[in-house]
Amino acid sequence: MRIDAALRDARSRLASSPSAALDAELLLCHVLGQTRTWLFTWSDRELNTAQLAAFEALLARREIGEPVAHLTGEREFFGRPFRVTADTLIPRPDTETLIEVALALPLPAASRVVDLGAGTGAIGITLALEQPDWQVTLVDLSEAALQVARQNAKQLNSPVQCLSGSWLTPCDGLFDLIVSNPPYIDDADHHLQQGDVRFEPRSALVAADHGLADLVEIVRQATSKLVAGGWLMLEHGFEQGAAVRSLLVDAGFDTVRTEQDLGGNDRVTLGRFSVNDEQSTAKPGLTQG
């Protein structure tokens, strides 16, 4: 079967997917070890029996909903390939908003940065690669997820530190920037029964208190782990912007704002940690952001 015919048949089989054509192309690229440009350039080439069988096997798994990232073992994030497994969340384009906002912050050249609940390490590794002078730490409670993050860091030549533990608990010292894409979905949310999230680790998706529990805990811990003028940046659900802004304001953050994702939805809330004179005296040598 020719490549163009195979892709045409695949698009028909994956019609229930909102990205049927892209899914088919990515899966065939994976089988052939080629790029999408190559597919279109050589669309009249014939697939051999082994290639067609491998493609058919992946299509069958995609038909029942398995994420393309799990089938190919990777997902692109901020222009770089990241290894993905069933132990991690799949990096999503909306999270690139967090990267863009973080890179625009007025931070010291050699900032200390920590990515909490790092998963694949996509956020922390990307920040480290975009800002080579930053000292970036990745933290995750899941050792399996941390292993994926370590592999991604090695593959992308990113000198990040990886720590196992709950949020900021394993971290020493103070940070100029704390970032996190924590669990923030309500256990009763019907979206958990749809799309790729059905195959992702529930512990990385769901939080108590209508999805706010982990956000509350991170804000609480961050107040003792940020330098004066340091920033906390949190990804959250599209209906949680107001709640997260309130959490930051109540905890003593200023310059609090919410940024929207590619779809125009509230997605990332951040604030600058301000300390009064008494606190500054108690913590000498803090770096001003």
Image (spheres, rainbow, N blue to C red):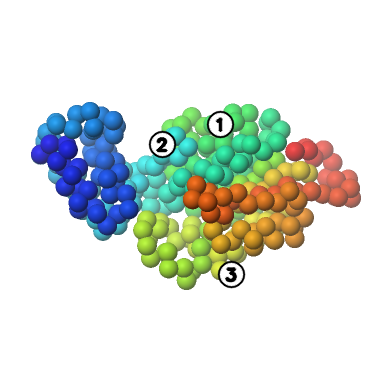
Whether residue 112 is visible here, answered yes or no, is no
Question: Separation of disc 3 and disc 1 at Cα?
Answer: 35 Å
Label 3 sits on residue: 209
Question: Separation of disc 3 and disc 2 at Cα?
Answer: 34 Å
Work out whether residue 102 or residue 200 is closer to the camera in this orientation and state it: 102
Label 2 sits on residue: 81
Q: Residue at x 76, y 51 (%)?
A: 254
* Figure check: 88 above or below 137: below
Label 1 sits on residue: 130
* Figure check: 16 above or below 274: below
Residue 105: image location, x then y, percent: 67, 38
Residue 74: image location, x then y, percent: 37, 42
Which amino acid lies under the numbered mark 2 shown in the image of this protein? Pro
Task: Determine the secondary structure under disc 3.
Answer: helix
Which amino acid lies under the numbered mark 3 shown in the image of this protein? Asp
Work out whether residue 142 or residue 117 is closer to the camera in this orientation and state it: 117
Pointer 3 or 2: first along the chain? 2
Whether residue 198 is visible here, answered yes or no, is yes
Work out whether residue 143 or residue 261 is closer to the camera in this orientation and state it: 261
The local crowd at label 1, few if under 14, some if 14 to 19, many if 20 or more residues have their Cα within 10 Å, is few
Question: Are circles 3 and 1 on residues that touch, CB within 8 Å?
Answer: no
The local crowd at label 2, few if under 14, some if 14 to 19, many if 20 or more residues have their Cα within 10 Å, is some
Task: Determine the secondary structure under disc 2.
Answer: strand
**Left of 51 or right of it: where is 285?**
right
Q: Quadrant of the C terminus?
A: top right
Question: Are circles 2 and 1 on residues that touch, CB within 8 Å?
Answer: no
The local crowd at label 3, few if under 14, some if 14 to 19, many if 20 or more residues have their Cα within 10 Å, is few
Q: Residue at x 35, y 46 (%)?
A: 69
Task: Determine the secondary structure under disc 1.
Answer: helix
Q: Quadrant of the N terminus?
A: top left
